[in-house]
Amino acid sequence: MCSQKDQKIKLCYHMSMSANEGLFYAEASQRINVYTRNPIMLIEQLSIKQPRTISFSSCGRYLAVGCLDGYIFVFRVIDNKHKLIWKNRIAEPEIRFIEFTPDDNYVFFSGNKTVHRLSIANGKVEMIKQFDTTMIWQMQKVDNAFLFAVCGKKSTELYYMQYYLDETPVNKWIQIPVDAGHGEFVLISKSHEMLFIFKNMGMGKTGVKTYHFNNKIITLTHKEDFIADVTGGYYKLSPDGNLLAITSIAEYASTDLPNKITRKTRLFQVNPFLELIMFDTPIACGAGFGPKSDLLLLPGNPGKIITLNTYNLHT
């Protein structure tokens, strides 16, 4: 069910898995480490300063990377080797999200307040939206559209952006009412049927409101859940929306190594809400899921990769 491999990761922000499930990616401060899955083996290091978010094309031939300094990189992947084919920078302090369209012709990416579209064919970049907000919480691809959760001046707002109509690129935006206060964090599952709103309740508790999203209508699924000992950190939903991994930013005494400080990564089933398993993780990082939601990736302790088969964990 669970295995640790002796590939050291001294610092890691997020872990991801390629669309064809052949490669692992670990984002560190000055590079991205690339590993084969079976066996887990470091095969390449991409020299990139401050990577923050990555995306894979559905065909498996392209990798896009957004960085904390505003740079975007696009690589072509051939025989597990990465060749840089495009690089540019936007006038924003960071790239928060990046996604390919299903046909792999475009890459959409967002800064704190703007949304851009990159053509893979000609390298042209267009800014297609600027929000009058504090920050874009999340950008999630759903069929032929994107959902954007943004932190507005008085509340968290949700926007549905259609980018294709009869195979023609369009730029059609719809704002969707959602009951979320200012600064409340929103996560949207890749299946786009589940939406979660997180609110710091104080006293070491986080409230979680679960919604069903269908045909641009949001309805509260059940009463609010509460998670103890979680007051912020890294939240990651599985692609099918059934699992939630949370890595706390708070530090704890390690249960495995005396006199060592660690963070906790906890895996939850979301409907009904139920904690399944907890790990010590030596650094604050975002866990990763495989594209089929059956595999969880995270740095272990001390500095090893943990791969967890999630198939039999939730009911």
Image (cartoon, helix red, strand yellow):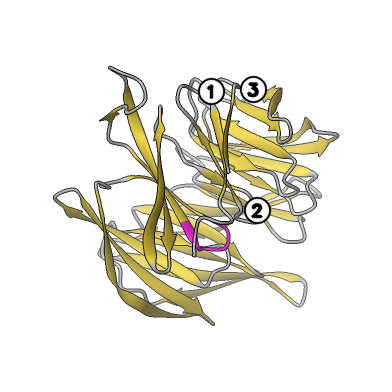
Q: Furthest residue to the left?
A: 203
Amino acid under disc 3: Ser
Q: From the viewer's perspective, is residue 274 above or below residue 308?
A: below
Toward the viewer: 247 or 76?
247
Residue bearing mark 2: 291
- Quick one: label 2, few (<14), some, or many (20+) residues within 10 Å? some
Residue bearing mark 3: 47
Q: CA distance from mark 2 to mark 3?
A: 25 Å
Toward the viewer: 125 or 203?
203
Quarter of the view holding residue 137: bottom left
Amino acid under disc 1: Ile
Q: From the viewer's perspective, is residue 207 above or below residue 90?
A: below
Amino acid under disc 2: Pro
- 114 lies left or right of 63: left
Query: Where residue 147 sits in the image (x, y, percent)?
Result: 52, 66
Question: Which residues, given as a range, are shown in magenta?
Answer: 238-243
Q: CA distance from mark 2 to mark 1?
A: 22 Å
Task: Classify mark 2: helix, strand or loop.
Answer: loop
